[in-house]
Image (spheres, grey):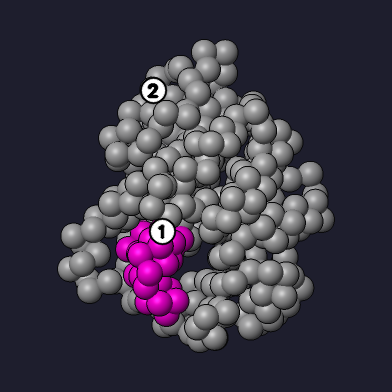
Amino acid sequence: MSDSVFDVALFGEAMLLLVANEPGPLENATGFHKRTAGAETNVAIGLARLGLKVGWASRLGTDSMGRALLAAMQGEGIDCSHVVCDATQRTGFQFKERVTDGRDPQVEYHRKGSAASQMGPADVDEPWLRSARHLHTTGVFAAISDTSLQAAIRTLEVMRAAGRTISFDPNLRPTLWSSPETMRHWINTLATYADWVLPGMEEGVFLTGETSPEGVARFYRERGAKLVVVKLGPEGAYYDSDVAGTGRVPGVPVAQVVDTVGAGDGFAVGVISALLEGLSVPAAVRRGAWIGARAVQVLGDTEGLPTRAQLQEAGL
């Protein structure tokens, strides 16, 4: 759209990430270094680094963690005009184990009652939201509180009514939901609003009851998605699209898996940016696989997200 202010709008929680300096159980860690984390936050940063115009809406405390996160997001060139800094609420944070064997690290979240969890439908500025070409959302923002779930639904309703494209990553967080059944219900409800659905294979099995990438993709395609990309980890991804049919894209080999957290967000950055640029579905999935592979080779959730120059150097 020629009158769009932003390429992509996102609502979600930013958290301060404290990564252990040395491998081993978190209780034995003697020091940490701080990073930025949060599913929607990671995607916002990744898209901004590629030169897209990104607007991010959230709530932060006015504590030191909130100030650090706001400065980090602004430093990436992200529009933060709709971030509310609330002196009465605290900013969420998390501790992450450092691992050396490629497994998923232990992560401890401290987000209950955080400023972002206080977000609700009243935080959705509809004219601002409609000024974006595209909305990306995940199951994390919807899970952090009952009011954030209603806010997530409102963002989807507004953008659907405005004819904008929507992408959705289930990004399951079982501990944030009251039950597995509740999580399945709401995640699948949110997915019905999306044009592009990006589940991992394990998530897809839980959400759909299907046991193959083809079955998972078909489940969401039958419910209105124009494109479903099922992430298959090191094996790449399977896609089912109304314009490109079905196909597989191989995984990108990595020398060493350092930290798996953030790989799915990197994948989303690649797919969303490529599709908004008008690239083909296979090209978009290839870009997603490449960025996801970069993400697992570094510590932190955003350190592996490339610049436009790095993307061009890779021919993507």
Q: Nearer the viewer, residue 140 or 97?
A: 140
Q: Residue furthest top?
A: 87
Q: Which residue is mark 1?
A: 269
Under circle 1, the secondary element is helix
Residue 200 image position (x, y, % from top left): 57, 67
Q: Nearer the viewer, mark 2 or mark 1?
A: 1
Quadrant position of the N terminus in the picture:
bottom left
Under circle 2, the secondary element is helix
Q: Amino acid at mark 1?
A: Val
Q: Residue furthest front?
A: 3
Q: Nearer the viewer, residue 146 or 16?
A: 146
Q: How many marks overall?
A: 2
Residue 232 image position (x, y, % from top left): 52, 75
**Which residues lie in the magenta part?**
267-296
Q: Residue at x 37, y 35 (%)?
A: 79
Disc 1 crowd rating (10 Å Cα; few below 14, some 14-19, many 20+) is many
Disc 2 crowd rating (10 Å Cα; few below 14, some 14-19, many 20+) is some
Mark yes or no: residue 205 visible.
Answer: no
Q: Residue at x 66, y 58 (%)?
A: 193
Residue 241's label in the rendered image is none
Q: Return the disc, 2 or 1, that comes first in the chain's sequence.
A: 2
Quadrant position of the C terminus in the picture:
bottom left
Q: Which residue is mark 2?
A: 67
Whole-Å distance between the Cαs marked 2 and 1? 25 Å
Q: Amino acid at mark 2?
A: Arg
Q: Relative to residue 173, is residue 313 drawn left or right?
A: left
Residue 265 image position (x, y, % from top left): 46, 56
Is 273 within the magenta? yes
Q: Relative to residue 109, is residue 251 drawn left or right?
A: left
Q: Relative to residue 130, is residue 118 drawn left or right?
A: right
Quarter occupied by residue 16: top left
Mark yes or no: residue 184 visible.
Answer: yes
